[in-house]
Amino acid sequence: MHTPLISVVVSTFNRKESLLQTLRGLETQTYSRNLFEVIIVNDGSSDGTEDMLKNYAATTPLAFRFVSQRNGGPAAARNKGIALASGTWIAFTDDDCIPDTNWLQSIYTTISNTNWIGIQGSTYTDRDRITPLTHQIDNETGNRSVPTCNAAYLRSALLEVGGFDELFPFPHNEDADLAWRIQQIGIIGFSEHMRMYHPPRVDAFKKVAKRMRILESEFRLYYKNKSSYQLHRASSAWKNIYWEIGCKTQWYYLKSRLKFWREPKLLIQGISLTLIWWYDLIRLFPQFKKSAKENELLFS
């Protein structure tokens, strides 16, 4: 067996059906199968993912491995994948994404013609299917946070910066933190040809309603990477949470949800979410304040 140039690492948790679509997308890559491997880290799934992966491993033509671990979040799972990988480059995507057939070929072409140590790809979605209850990444021109659903890094760079930070309180911002640390040692470029489809994923209303709590992760990101945060996001975590997100973004969401006036249930859900999120930003203020103090002391 040839040593792979690229290792594809995917963290998964309770999404066996969409993960199978991701794997089918990797099977159709135009890039030679001798030059890449696929590593799946099952992060404590309870929906039969492990059995599905066992069956898949027995039949797939890919160079394929999977490992299961106790649920520790995507940062811990991706670090496990990095440790297992043998490729010079590691390409990341998520278990609800589908790569274009030339995704890996585009990564190879890019690394062959640049001195970059990281690449951010173009991620697109089906905008007509977006509703207040869907989650999707729509990033066709690049994002300063470098979402890990479509990114590749030189493995040596990942090891040099210590991989993903597993101590963020929620699975949010660990990808930005990684990218900003890697940018201290080299260039992360953007490739419009490295394309990934991120279908709108419908989540339960109760889950979406709790989304504001993940903003606690802003404080670890800010105090750990203050200059990068101020350059790429906002002058402070407080401004980002309560002005950029709490005011500007939520006002945009509120207006965009009015288009569902022909679908009363979605309209009511969308407006309700905005009101709940505004309420939560007030309710969570003491916890945010505590987190800000803790991280300021930690990184001072």
Image (spheres, grey):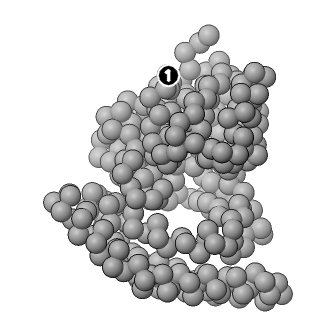
Circle 1 crowding by C-alpha within 10 Å: few under 14, some 14–19, many from 20 = some
Type of amino acid at the residue the image marks with label 1:
Ser
Disc 1, SS: loop
Q: Residue at x 20, y 57 (%)?
A: 299
Can residue 130 be seen at all in this image of the molecule? yes
Quadrant of the rendering where the C terminus is positioned: bottom left
Quick one: quadrant of the N terminus?
top right
Q: Residue furthest top?
A: 1
Decide if residue 21 is on the left or right side of residue 158: right
Left or right, 275 with reference to 63: left
Which residue is outermost to the right? 262
State whether residue 87 is above or below residue 268: above
- Please say if 291 is above or below 82: below
Q: Which residue is mark 1?
A: 86
Q: Position of residue 220 (x, y in %)?
A: 32, 61
Residue 200: x and y, percent? 71, 62
Residue 82 in picture, x, y percent from top left? 46, 32
* Above or below, 59 relative to 190: above
Q: Residue at x 82, y 84 (%)?
A: 263
Point 75% across, 81% down: residue: 266
**Nearest to the observer: residue 104 or residue 206:** 206
Q: Nearer the viewer, residue 281 or 226?
A: 281
